[in-house]
């Protein structure tokens, strides 16, 4: 068994294989030098300094040792010889396999000129530690991109007391993730905490002084002074090494409902695009718990269970005093109805309806209620009618 990718999805696959009785050779290949670690805390607790780096490790050395696996860390897969059943590494090694799991995750999108000193992306532990050091110098910060990552980084920087401007070409933050109603509330939350929002305008270029970023010029000609710029404009599946493999590649490694891309070759985590029978659509999910659950499902299917992976995705975002949690999917033109609480109170659950059924529920500081209302998604419940209870509000 060979697993390419030594983060949450890859590690969970390996552990599940061992737990289900597989006692053969097991190799994990990871392009970072670190043992497997958790990524969500990077933009929150690591960046803020609340956690030391050791705390994000998913397993200690003893647990890793008990896997009896060959960890090849700091090595990058550069090609897949699918007919020959071999993975080629950047050090010239060729790793043979009977079964392969692709768990290479995603790569941050870049902007022209973002190689300047002072311009950061945030994907790895080393990225987070470097950015943390720069934030401690109390710079002026511009965050480009108001999705999950950008909004969380902006919140941490404001909590640190820094001058923060959040920029996005869309008119509200997190529009792609949750639509306009929730996006407006996210934007208002950032404004309430002192962040400056420049929305509905893109970035034209980065301006420099002595080789370091000095400002961000927007498409409307506005120049924002900046000592530190964080680029959070999304990611692309890390599949370039598979370009000549013959595997089906689209928005990720395209798999069937069992997460299999070709006989004996599977994908798990952020890189996997699979048909989810619960929603009847192909999807790719860049969230932590999907990586864990999909890794376990892949291990079971490799060992013969052949069960469709019918996940109801779960994910969350912490921004200031807001805990945003969500179950399901959130189509662009979904009907949004508050089914508990009130947007005005910033404590509510909203249901997202699509083609007459609830496909997603989002809770804002409403963990207990959301846990119950998740069942609407599980049961394919009909879309609820608009709430008229006092204190509720339609988005």
Image (spheres, rainbow, N blue to C red):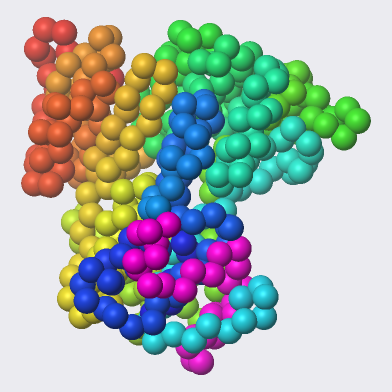
Task: Measuring from the top left, give residue 143's x and y in whole percent.
Answer: 61, 27
Residue 7 seen? no
Q: Find residue 220 and report its image quarter.
A: top right
Name the side, left or right, on which 44 lies relative to 114.
left
Residue interval drawn in magenta:
61-88
Q: Which of the pair 342/352 is nearer the observer?
A: 342
Name the side, left or right, on which 120 lies relative to 155.
right
Q: Which residue is at a point 38% across and 27% down the rendered structure image?
A: 318
Q: For the C terminus, which image quadrant?
A: top left
Task: Measuring from the top left, give residue 34's x and y in whole percent.
Answer: 54, 55
Task: Measuring from the top left, give residue 274's x and y in whole percent.
Answer: 33, 64
Extreme residue in the front direction: 62
Task: Measuring from the top left, give residue 266's x and y in whole percent.
Answer: 37, 73
Relative to 344, say whether 153 is above or below: below
Name the side, left or right, on which 141 lies relative to 197.
right
Q: Find residue 89 and report its image quarter.
A: bottom right
Q: Which residue is at a point 47% across and 78% down the rendered structure image?
A: 247
Extreme residue in the right direction: 210
Residue 90 seen? yes
Q: Find residue 223 and report its image quarter.
A: top right
Reply yes or no: does residue 76 show up in magenta.
Answer: yes
Reply yes or no: does residue 145 show up in magenta.
Answer: no
Q: Which residue is at a point 36% across and 39% down the rendered structure image?
A: 332
Name the side, left or right, on which 110 lies relative to 299.
right
Q: Which of the pair 133/282 is nearer the observer?
A: 133
Q: Which residue is at a point 36% across and 16% down the rendered structure image?
A: 321
Q: Which of the pair 66/132 is nearer the observer?
A: 66
Q: For the N terminus, which image quadrant?
A: bottom left
């Amino acid at each position: 068994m060979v697993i390419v990718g030594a983060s949450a999805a890859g590690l969970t696959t390996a552990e599940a294989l061992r737990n289900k009785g597989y006692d053969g050779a097991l190799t994990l290949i990871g392009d970072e030098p670190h043992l497997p670690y958790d990524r969500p805390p990077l933009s929150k607790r690591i960046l803020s300094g609340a956690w030391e780096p050791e705390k994000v490790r998913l397993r200690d050395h003893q647990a890793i040792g008990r896997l009896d696996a060959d960890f090849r860390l700091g090595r990058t897969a550069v090609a897949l010889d699918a007919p020959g059943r071999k993975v080629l590494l950047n050090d010239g090694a060729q790793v043979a396999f009977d079964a392969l799991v692709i768990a290479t995750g995603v790569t941050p999108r870049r902007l022209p000129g973002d190689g300047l000193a002072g311009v950061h992306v945030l994907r790895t532990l080393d990225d987070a530690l470097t950015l943390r050091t720069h934030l401690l110098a109390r710079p002026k910060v511009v965050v480009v991109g108001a999705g999950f990552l950008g909004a969380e980084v902006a919140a941490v920087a404001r909590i640190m007391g820094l001058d923060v401007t959040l920029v996005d070409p869309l008119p509200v933050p997190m529009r792609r993730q949750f639509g306009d109603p929730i996006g407006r509330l996210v934007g208002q939350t950032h404004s309430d905490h002192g962040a400056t929002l420049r929305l509905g305008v893109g970035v034209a270029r980065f301006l420099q002084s002595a080789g370091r970023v000095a400002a961000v010029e927007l498409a409307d000609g506005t120049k924002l002074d900046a000592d530190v710029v964080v680029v959070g404009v999304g990611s692309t599946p890390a599949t370039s090494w598979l370009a000549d493999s013959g595997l089906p590649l689209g928005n990720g490694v395209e798999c069937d409902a069992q997460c299999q891309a070709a006989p004996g070759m599977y994908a798990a985590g952020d890189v996997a695009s699979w048909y989810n029978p619960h929603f009847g659509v192909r999807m790719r999910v860049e969230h932590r718990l999907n990586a864990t659950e999909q890794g376990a499902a892949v291990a079971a299917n490799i060992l013969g269970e052949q069960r469709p992976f019918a996940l109801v995705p779960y994910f969350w975002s912490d921004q200031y005093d807001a805990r945003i949690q969500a179950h399901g999917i959130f189509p662009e033109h979904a009907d949004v109805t508050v089914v508990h609480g009130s947007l005005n109170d910033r404590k509510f659950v909203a249901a997202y309806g699509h083609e007459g059924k609830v496909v997603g529920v989002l809770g804002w500081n409403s963990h207990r209620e959301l846990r119950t209302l998740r069942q609407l998604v599980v049961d394919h419940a009909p879309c609820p009618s608009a709430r008229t209870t006092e204190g509720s509000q339609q988005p």
